[in-house]
Amino acid sequence: MLRYFLKKLKHFAEWPNHSPKRLANRVANYTSRLKAGEHALGLPSVVMIEISSACQLRCPLCPVGSQTLDRVSQIMPLETFKKIVDELGDYLYHININGMGEPLLNNQIVEMVRYAKSKNVFVDLYTNFEITDKHEIIEGLVDAGLDSILVAIDGATSAVYEEYRIRGNFDRVSDNVRKLVQARKKAGKSKPEINIQFVPMKQNHHQMKEMTQLAHDLGADMLEIKRPFLFWGQKADALKFLPNEEKFNMYEIDGDTISWKGEEKPICGFLWTSSVILPNGSVTPCCFDYEGSATFGNINESSFIEIWNGKKYKAFRRAMKKGWRSIPLCSKSFEGGCPNMFIQPDDWLIPAADWDKKDTTKPDTIPPSSDAASGCKKQ
Ligand SMILES: C[S@@+](CC[C@H](N)C(=O)[O-])C[C@H]1O[C@@H](n2cnc3c(N)ncnc32)[C@H](O)[C@@H]1O
Ligand code: SF4
Ligand code: SF4
């Protein structure tokens, strides 16, 4: 346990944008998290901003891709993004541009990144990188100072990639990664860090070695292996896609019952440290609220601080203290309960320096290098 905390502390010390305000705010966050009261001290130090809930792909294990999401597709206007950064920027360590859609479908993404970087916030972005003919976006992201990008490539060949990333095109994504590597080189920069994410499933997990080769050939910096989870109502797909191998599969499946293997956590810390803002300005507790069902207010109608310690956020924190299973969002949005409420191994990160040194098909977790405490990942 002590080693775990020391590792976390070292990782925190390495964050690139400490300031007295951010540090004091982070301490306030953790104090309220420990107390777990209804009131949150300070402001969040991490926010996830969903700048697009639209997507061009049809990945079967994603509610957007499987078109089971009840929410309408929306694009966040630049003004909303700026409003968030204006109020929170001095306190934020990290903005994760991500959510339930494809962020690169928002044509103002470069201006958004540039604006957040002008406040020295660490900015990263998760994408399918399926954009077409948009050199200016790729070069613009480098120029704007994006810190890190995570490109989802769930297969090392066209056939395997396109079996899950339906409507996707393996050559297009690969080409875009190469263009990004070139753009970064041309600009003489070391950022953004280019990470490739691979979700091992039945159809692709045999390609682990090929994925390392692909990440190497594309010129990426890191390969991240993320184990799959199941949104609510995906029992049938579980049998089709969930890999059987222990190291990739975090679920126990017993007939109709699906449960997590990991030990259960008592409380969700996100409520005192981070928040999520949807394209229409609605504030929700976490990215696991993919339907936007637990909204606490709207950034276009009030200040964030009013929402953060408003009646609805406070009521949610009180409910969390009584037990997360009684909150419908936390117990009923995912098969087996919210993925954040179970202790699981971290994503499995393989830096470029290790690609030819060791057996990358074996889990060997290292702390993320630039992932300052990303949105709905572990904090
Ligand atoms: C909803 S996507 C949005 C960003 C972008 N459209 C993409 O696919 O990268 C956010 C992240 O969730 C991951 N994701 C989606 N469905 C998942 C699942 N069932 N299990 C694990 N990760 C999943 C994606 O790979 C991506 O990294
Ligand atoms: S690309 Fe991302 S948002 Fe789109 S369907 Fe796939 S996982 Fe979902
Ligand atoms: S759904 Fe999960 S991450 Fe979101 S508030 Fe509930 S327990 Fe926390």
Image (cartoon, rainbow, N blue to C red):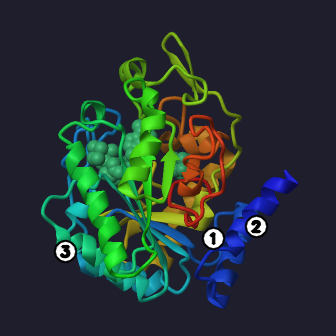
Residue at (69% x, 83% y) in the render: 24
| Quadrant housing the C terminus | bottom right
- At numbered mark 2, what does the secondary structure look like: helix, strand or loop? helix
What residue sits right under mark 3 in the picture? 136
Q: Is residue 275 visible?
A: yes
User: Image check: 40 left or right of 257?
Assistant: right
Q: Are marks 2 and 3 in contact (CB under 8 Å)?
A: no
Q: Which numbered marker is on residue 170?
A: none
Identify the residue at image location x=60%, y=53%. 378
Q: Residue 153: x and y, percent?
A: 35, 45
Residue drawn at the location 26% of the way across and 40% of the way down: 65
- Of 295 and 285, nearer the camera is 285
User: Which of these two is toward me, 175 or 199?
Assistant: 175
Please, which residue is most extreme toward the right here? 2
Position of residue 265 measured from the top left corner of the image (x, y, whole percent): 69, 43
Which amino acid type is shown beneath numbered disc 1? Answer: Ala
Sequence order check, earlier mark of 3 and 1: 1
Q: How far apart in space, not on screen, are marks 2 and 1 (Cα)?
A: 22 Å
> 75 or 200: nearer the eye?
200
| Residue designated by label 2 | 9
Secondary structure under the numbered disc 1 in the rendered image: loop
Disc 1: which residue:
40
- Residue 285 rendering spot, x and y as whole percentages: 49, 58
Identify which amino acid the numbered label 3 is placed on: Glu
The image quarter in which residue 4 lies: bottom right
Kind of residue sitting beneath label 2 = Leu
Label 2 to label 3, Cα distance in Å?
Answer: 38 Å
Farthest-out residue, top: 255
Is residue 229 shown to the viewer in this render?
no
Q: Residues within 10 Å of mark 3 (few under 14, many from 20)?
A: few
